[in-house]
Image (cartoon, helix red, strand yellow):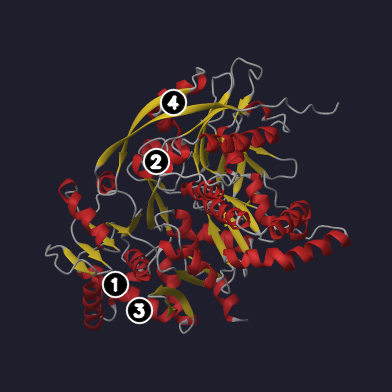
Amino acid sequence: MNIENTWREDGSATTFPLRLEQLARIRGAEVALREKRLGIWQTMTWMAFAAQVRALTCGLAQAGVTHGDHVVLIGGNRPRLQAAFAAVQALRAIPVPLYQDAPGSEYVYLLNSAGVKFAIVEEQEQVDKLIEIRPACPTLGTIWYDDPRGLRSYTHADLQSIDHLVAAGQAFDIASPTFYAATVSLVQADDVAAMFFTSGTTSLAKGVVHTHRSLISSASSGAAFDRISSNEEVLAFLPPAWLGQNIFSYAMWLVCGYMVNFPESQETVAIDLKEIGPTYYFAPPRTFEDMLTSVTVRMADAGVLKRRAFDAFLGLARRVGPAILARDTVSLFDRLAYGLGDLLLFRQLRSQLGLSRLRLAYTAGEAIGPDLFTFFRSIGINLKQLYGTTETAVFVCMQPDGRVRPETVGVPAPGVQVRISEDGELQVRTPGALKEYYKNPAATSEVLDADGWYHTGDAALLTPDGQIRIVDRLKDVGSLEGGPHDGSTFAPKYVENKLKFSPYIKEVVAFGHGRDRVCAFINIDFESVGNWAERKNLSYAGYQDLAQKAAVADLIRTCVETANAELAQDSLVAGNQVARFLILHKQLDPDDEELTRTRKVRRGFIAERYRVLVDALFEGRTSQHVETEIGFEDGRKGVVAATVAVHDAKTFPALKCAA
């Protein structure tokens, strides 16, 4: 039996510290992770990583971290933060990752609600935020940092480098060589492994408590479903505070033993992606939207012959590409023509995107538009949707090979049960379910019943072949009232995703519940529309100036009407066509509380904040003056004012179904 199978079949390592110890013992000399520093990829073996975790565990213990303590980790994807996460778990303390781009004011509630005593951060930016809010966080003690740049002159008594922590831990380990093994042996499968805060789309963020058992069970289920092995390579570029990233770059990493690669910075991700060429990739729909935008911009700048060839081959790819990927029957002529397109265009395109070696890609976090999904599968990228939540540790529904469809999220993952309630809510029973919301039994009982069923709050349908189709958030699904579509179902997310397939549209917020029609706010894609404007010799001074151009409004109107024509083809959503729209004078921003840190639209907050614009849409006005307070990264506030034009869009009769 080979090493890989020995590792995957050994079920004795039921906690993350034990899994790391096993990997270090069985595959110690093999590369566990790589980090790009100063343009050079540096490697670390399983044995070296385990040694670092051991030193950090001993150092944290010497510093007073003990069973049950909450330790926040704030920063990007860095090997030493990964090791610190594992070290906190080894002490039966609880790692709590937070988003590194959040302002310090957002941390106050999170730190106080969890009673955080210690913090481990990446760099000066996070240190400054914690020092600033420290008076409002009375339990916060020592702060350790990884990157010393800019911190040499800091004299705070409770501020230390991770180097200091490692050195102290190594000295303690020499003096007490049995401490680490004895400590790790105390960790149990049902101990708390980590706490992740929800995105807070509609309310205050809640601390989702997961055990070693729930996270390992979910990661193992996902690995078994798609045969994920130790041979995969992953790029960890998303925020570690997002459970999705943690599952792929930590939990599944320790379950499967594959290699994780850490980019040099967020600015170099696209370059690093090309250099690594991952075989296993995970990203939210927004990342794939950005990729499509970059493709569209490049093709717009290409020569006439290349554009025509691309359009012709892409039309063929949309028709037969997904079937070829699914190994369905395709005519010999179409297969040969697609092969020529792959040789001349699609292979180069995949290479430019950094996906040339890709075996499997997942998208999750929110629904992906069917057109966007089909585009990537058409050019030979095995992109799949998966469904899960922070509370269910990601892997709930997955798409099996040969049965991948853009409108569904697949079938239940191994060990997962699903059902749909009478009111259409998807409910889940899974080993990956949360233990509880931290210190919030009322909220826990609302979503987790006595029989172990988690109530997702998502409206779903079961297809005849047993796949799950997510409609929208149950609370967001509404109905139109009055007008020609009175009583029609209104599904805002479906409409928004349809519009966002356009490379010129970055974000959409649709409104329609209780109204006689559907209207929308639109954020243009600044890069894509800016490139279009330059080709049209249209000058502009910034986002607001570009968004207010009449020519841009005409461009977006064309995109809206194209989406409306497609919506009219489906009798179920034909009433969801956008009758009126406006282009927002500013980009929606997490710092202004309009988006969550995972870039989800906070629809209710936006509707209230821009109520005067919502009224302008539905009351037939042609323009509306608005003043909006905005926040800057340094905490300052400002006001942006504009007169926003409101535009009508053509709608189409619903396609009549044949009798």
**Residue shown at 62% from the left, 68% from the top:** 356
- Give the residue at the far right of this rendering: 332
Mark 4 belongs to which amino acid? Answer: Leu
Which type of secondary structure does the marked residue at label 1 adopt?
A: helix
Query: Which x, y percent locates residue 390?
Result: 46, 49
Mark identifier at residue 189: none
Mark identifier at residue 200: 2
Query: Which x, y percent locates residue 423?
Result: 59, 29
| 583 left or right, relative to 67 | right
Which type of secondary structure does the marked residue at label 2 adopt?
A: loop
Mark 2 belongs to which amino acid? Answer: Gly
Mark 3 belongs to which amino acid? Answer: Ala
Separation (CA) of disc 1 from disc 2: 32 Å
Separation (CA) of disc 3 from disc 2: 37 Å
Instruction: Indicate the quadrant containing the C terminus: top left, top right, bottom left or bottom right.
Output: top right
The residue indicated by pointer 1 is 56
Name which of mark 1 and mark 2 comes first in the sequence. Answer: 1
Front position among marks 1 and 4: 4
The residue indicated by pointer 4 is 613
Residue 158 location, quadrant: bottom left
Front position among marks 2 and 4: 4
Question: Callout 3: few (<14), some (14-19), or many (20+) C-alpha neighbours within 10 Å?
Answer: some
CB-based contact (under 8 Å), mark 4 and mark 3:
no
Name which of mark 4 and mark 3 comes first in the sequence. Answer: 3
Which type of secondary structure does the marked residue at label 3 adopt?
A: helix
| 490 left or right, relative to 628 | right
Separation (CA) of disc 1 from disc 4: 53 Å
**Number of callouts in the render?**
4
* Depth order, front residue of 579/25: 579
